[in-house]
């Protein structure tokens, strides 16, 4: 019987990923074909392309990929695409304003997908710091965006963040 706490590291040369009919993420791992594969980032989410849990359609773990950069070109591209689908997270390019009104924090942001507004009751519950200078923001309705590196933003954005970071 397989130990549920044992981590099986997958060997990059024994893996290939592709898209099946309807765009389903699929692959061959250690010679076995999987018609559907589900991927998860391992906690902490600091590592966005390392320690990726690969699971079958029943969510049973097949193994863990140490680093997707070690995969062949097509497999790496499909894995990156699948992770983008699973962890859809617009990237903040500018912080226009952060205002505190009565019991709400209102963030006006520019992202790689256009302008957005986040509304939060408190900062503690809605700001995550997964590592480095990365910040993940989640509003009251579950809408999320990411500041990849708040120190790399323009001076106006850094000024807006200074009081809340």
Image (cartoon, rainbow, N blue to C red):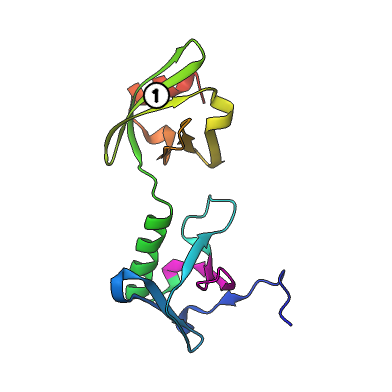
Kindly give the residue lying farthest to the left in the view shown. 114
Residue 19 lies, in percent from the top left, at 33, 74
Tally the marks.
Answer: 1
Residue 129 lies, in percent from the top left, at 55, 38
* Residue depicted at x 39% and y 49%: 88
Q: Left of 27 or right of it: where is 50?
A: right
Q: Give the extent of the magenta segment.
A: 53-69
Relative depth, front residue between 55 and 65: 55
Relative depth, front residue between 71 and 105: 105
Q: Left of 129 or right of it: where is 108?
A: left
Residue 85 falls within the magenta-colored stretch: no
* Residue depicted at x 45% and y 33%: 141
Residue 24 lies, in percent from the top left, at 36, 71
Q: Quadrant of the N terminus?
A: bottom right
* Residue depicted at x 48% and y 30%: 140
Residue that carries the numbered disc 1 in the rendered image: 107
Kindly give the residue lying farthest to the top in the view shown. 102
Characterize the local packing of mark 1: few (<14), some (14-19) or many (20 or more) Cα atoms within 10 angstroms.
Answer: many
Q: Is residue 123 above or below residue 28?
A: above
Q: Is residue 71 above or below residue 43?
A: below
Q: Is residue 6 above or below residue 122?
A: below
Quarter-wise, where is residue 73 in the image?
bottom left
* Residue depicted at x 38% and y 69%: 76
**SS class, disc 1:** strand
Residue 80 lies, in percent from the top left, at 38, 62
């Amino acid at each position: 019987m397989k130990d549920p706490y044992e981590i099986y590291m997958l060997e990059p040369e024994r893996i290939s990923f592709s898209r099946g009919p309807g765009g389903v993420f699929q692959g061959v791992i250690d010679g076995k074909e999987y018609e559907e594969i589900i991927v998860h980032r391992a906690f902490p989410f600091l590592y966005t392309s390392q320690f990726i849990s690969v699971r079958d359609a029943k969510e049973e773990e097949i193994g863990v990929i140490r680093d997707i950069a070690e995969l062949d070109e097509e497999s790496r591209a499909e894995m990156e695409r699948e992770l983008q689908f699973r962890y859809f997270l617009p990237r903040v390019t500018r912080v226009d304003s952060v205002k505190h009104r009565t019991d709400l924090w209102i963030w006006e942001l520019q992202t790689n997908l256009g302008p957005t507004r986040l509304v939060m009751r408190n900062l503690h519950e809605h700001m995550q710091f997964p590592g480095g200078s990365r910040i993940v923001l989640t509003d009251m309705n579950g809408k999320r965006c990411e500041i990849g590196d708040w120190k790399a933003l323009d001076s106006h954005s850094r000024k807006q963040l200074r009081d809340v970071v």
